[in-house]
Amino acid sequence: MTGGQIALLVGLILLIDSVVVGSIFYAVSQTMRDLSSKFPPMEPLPDSVRRRFQSFKIGLINLGWCVHVAVDERYLHLTPTRLARWFGVRAMSVPWEAIEVVGKAAFGSSIRVRIAGEEILDPRGA
């Protein structure tokens, strides 16, 4: 191969990678945009229970160790970690009335809920 062919091949590979990564970023941000626009983030109450670096699966998106959770009597507060924010995940506060428990997941240690038509899986069932 000539130097020009190698440069063309490397450029083509970089272009394809950019399209794939951009598509992933877009898919994640679109999925999360609907939920975060319906449930804007609120400040958790001072006595809320908090857990850091929790795992959730929202639709096709697996957010392993990418969500900080706060729970008070009004809302379930989901705040993405910095890594998840890079992918377009936004903070949200979901009122308890909007959460519908679907049941246990197929693997038994997870709980499935539905929020605004989007299925969410908590892998530990916490």
Image: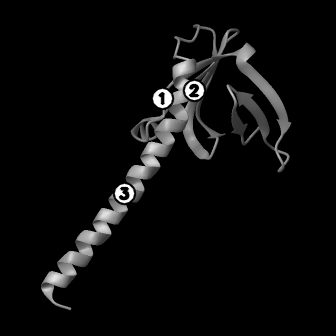
- Classify residue 44 by image quadrant: top right
- Classify residue 85 by image quadrant: top left
**Amino acid of disc 1:** Arg
Crowdedness near tag 2: few (<14), some (14–19) or many (≥20) residues, C-alpha within 10 Å? many
Q: Residue at x 14, y 85 (%)?
A: 3
**Could you tell which of marks 2 and 3 lies nearer the N-terminus?**
3
Question: Which residue ends up furthest to the bottom in the rendered image?
Answer: 1
**Amino acid of disc 3:** Val
Tell me the CA gap for discs 2 and 1.
9 Å
Q: Are marks 1 and 3 in contact (CB under 8 Å)?
A: no
Q: Position of residue 71 (x, y in %)?
A: 66, 18
Whether residue 62 is visible to the viewer of this picture, yes or no, is yes
Q: Which residue is mark 3?
A: 19
Please indicate whether residue 111 sits to the left or right of residue 42 in the image.
right
Tell me the CA gap for discs 2 and 3.
25 Å
Above or below 96: residue 123: below
Q: Residue at x 49, y 37 (%)?
A: 30
Whether residue 126 is visible to the viewer of this picture, yes or no, is no
- Classify residue 92 by image quadrant: top right
**Could you tell which of marks 2 and 1 lies nearer the N-terminus?**
2
Crowdedness near tag 3: few (<14), some (14–19) or many (≥20) residues, C-alpha within 10 Å? few
Q: Quadrant of the C terminus?
A: top right
Q: Which residue is mark 2?
A: 35
Q: Residue at x 21, y 82 (%)?
A: 6
Above or below 106: residue 94: above
The front one of 81 and 35 is 35
**Could you tell which of marks 1 and 3 lies nearer the N-terminus?**
3
Which element carries disc 1, helix, strand or loop? loop
Tell me the CA gap for discs 1 and 3.
23 Å
Which element carries disc 3, helix, strand or loop? helix
Label drawn at residue 90 = 1
Q: Quadrant of the N terminus?
A: bottom left
